[in-house]
């Protein structure tokens, strides 16, 4: 039993390292992802980050007005910092040959957002989470052009867990995670932009 757990942990770690290498090769530029990732999509900051940013910006603007320093440079600086914070909270949903993750490339490691190897994925459900599935972390939030997808997987200890995300093209994401290949437009070479 212990040997099985050790083998599972080693297999998980090997997949995570290969996934991290693929993400590093893909870089942070979205047009490079098509050649190096099975699926890649930016996930805007979640509702909590947007709410905290809005509340912080509002509090700062009120503070400026109370001190009679409500001037154009101060307001622009505050809005610029708020936009920078929201951009830095943007995640990337990535699927490689070895696993899936939700990461901010270049800012945080893959493991901080819970890498999941593809062999551990049991089911993917676009839309509403099935009632018998456990709750799990959600990446991103409602945004135009994004739909919710739930991934049920078996973690390294053998427990069933769920991760949810708001992604573009949820059916394509589900197919890619479950082992399908992303479809390419006919007559177009992979990785070439028009």
Image (cartoon, rainbow, N blue to C red):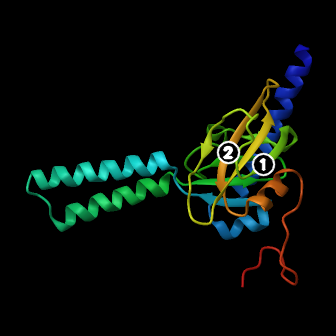
The part of the image, by quadrant, that contains residue 152 is: top right
Circle on res. 164: 2
Q: Residue at x 32, y 61 (%)?
A: 79
Q: Nearer the viewer, residue 148 or 73?
A: 148
Q: Nearer the viewer, residue 117 or 66?
A: 66
In the rendered structure, the answer to whether residue 8 lies left or right of residue 64 reads: right
The part of the image, by quadrant, that contains residue 176 is: bottom right
Q: Residue at x 57, y 65 (%)?
A: 144
Residue 27 seen in the figure:
no
Please state, as top left, top right, bottom left or bottom right, where the N terminus lies in the image: top right
Spot the residue most to the left: 68
Quick check: 17 above or below 104?
Answer: above
Residue 160 seen in the figure:
yes
Dot 1 crowding, Cα within 10 Å, few <14, some 14–19, many 20+: some
Q: CA distance from mark 1 to mark 2?
A: 9 Å
Please state, as top left, top right, bottom left or bottom right, where the C terminus lies in the image: bottom right
Report the residue marked by disc 1: 125
Local SS, label 2: strand
**Where is residue 29 drawn, in percent x and y?**
63, 65
Give the total number of marks visible in the rendering: 2
In the rendered structure, the answer to whether residue 4 lies left or right of residue 71 reads: right
Q: Nearer the viewer, mark 1 or mark 2?
A: 1
């Amino acid at each position: 039993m212990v040997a099985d757990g050790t083998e599972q942990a080693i297999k998980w770690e090997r997949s995570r390292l290969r996934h991290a290498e693929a993400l590093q090769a893909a870089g942070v530029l979205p047009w490079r992802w098509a050649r190096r990732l099975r699926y890649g999509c930016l996930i805007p900051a979640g509702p909590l980050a947007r709410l905290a940013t809005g509340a912080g910006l509002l509090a700062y603007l009120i503070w400026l007005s109370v001190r009679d320093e409500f001037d154009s440079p101060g307001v622009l600086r505050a809005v610029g910092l708020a936009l920078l914070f929201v951009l830095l909270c943007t995640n990337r949903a990535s699927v490689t040959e070895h696993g899936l993750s939700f990461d901010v490339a270049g800012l945080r490691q893959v493991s901080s957002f819970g890498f999941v190897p593809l062999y551990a994925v049991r089911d993917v459900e676009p839309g509403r989470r099935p009632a018998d599935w456990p709750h799990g972390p959600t990446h991103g939030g409602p945004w135009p052009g994004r739909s919710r997808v739930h991934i049920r997987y078996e973690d390294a200890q053998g427990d069933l867990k769920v991760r949810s995300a708001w992604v573009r093209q949820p059916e394509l994401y589900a197919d890619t995670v479950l082992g399908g290949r992303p479809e390419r437009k006919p007559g177009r070479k992979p990785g070439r932009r028009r």
